[in-house]
Image (tube, rainbow, N blue to C red):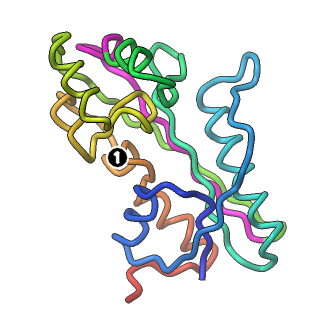
Amino acid sequence: MMILASSSPRRSELLQQIGVRFTTDVADIDETPLPGETPADYVARLSLAKARVVAQRHPGRVVLGSDTTVVLNDRILSKPEDDSQARQMLTELSGNSHQVMTAVALVQDSTEKQITVVTDVRFCELSAQQIDAYIATGEPADKAGSYGIQGLGAVLVASISGSYSNVVGLPLTETAALLGELGVPVWEK
């Protein structure tokens, strides 16, 4: 059985959706971006670090590490620290396009596989009242970029180009392909 190196309920739900059997073991790593690090390098580094830490605790097991970030004008929008920061992010995203990047890493002993998927997302024009009402729901608090497309934040999104599940937190098509390379089946009951 595979191990998910994440406490994300969204990643768990997505893996369950495609029938992957797994347990979880959370990796505790420093998620601070390095000076000059690109967003793509950032998510790739974190996903691999999470998988490696957990794989050390479980020799022989396949471990999946993943990291998702929202990128606006080559700048990482992480989880907001407070409502004020969420308001600032949502104001910046309003009426604009941004990218959601998710890196997926699989580690099994010395074998490592990794992919990064990018989805373009365009936000609707949002009024200050809409932003405040969305923040009042509490949903932005633990979401990169201060929104969740799978929840109430769906009404903020005008369009996407690419993988919807990537925006939720795990690109399923690409993840299933990587899992297949290491013999982890999908669609199991």
Q: Residue at the spot x=31%, y=12% of the render?
A: 91
Q: Residue at the spot x=74%, y=60% of the render?
A: 112
From the viewer's perspective, is 98 left or right of 60?
left
- Which quadrant is home to the C terminus? bottom left
Question: How many numbered discs sit on the rendered protein?
Answer: 1
- Which quadrant is home to the N terminus? bottom right
Q: Does the magenta stretch include residue 2?
A: no
Q: Residue 11, percent across and down?
A: 45, 58
Q: Residue 115, percent across and down?
A: 58, 49
Question: Would you say the magenta stretch is mainly helix, strand or loop?
Answer: strand
Q: Quadrant of residue 134?
A: top left
Q: What stretch is highlighted in magenta?
A: 91-108
Q: Which of 80 and 104 is in front in this view?
A: 80
Residue 10 lies, with reference to residue 176, above or below; the image says: above
Q: Residue 47, percent across and down?
A: 65, 48
Task: Count residues near mark 1 (Cα–Cα under 10 Å), then give few for <14, some for 14-19, many for 20+.
Answer: some
Q: Is residue 105 magenta?
A: yes
User: Which amino acid is tagged 1?
Assistant: Ser
Q: Residue 70, percent across and down?
A: 46, 29
Q: Mark 1 points at which residue?
A: 163
From the viewer's perspective, is 24 left or right of 57?
left
Q: Residue at the spot x=72%, y=64% of the render?
A: 107
Residue 42 lies, with reference to residue 107, above or below; the image says: above
Q: Residue at the spot x=70%, y=55% of the render?
A: 27
Residue 35 lies, with reference to residue 100, above or below; the image says: above
Secondary structure beneath label 1: loop
From the viewer's perspective, is 28 left or right of 170?
right
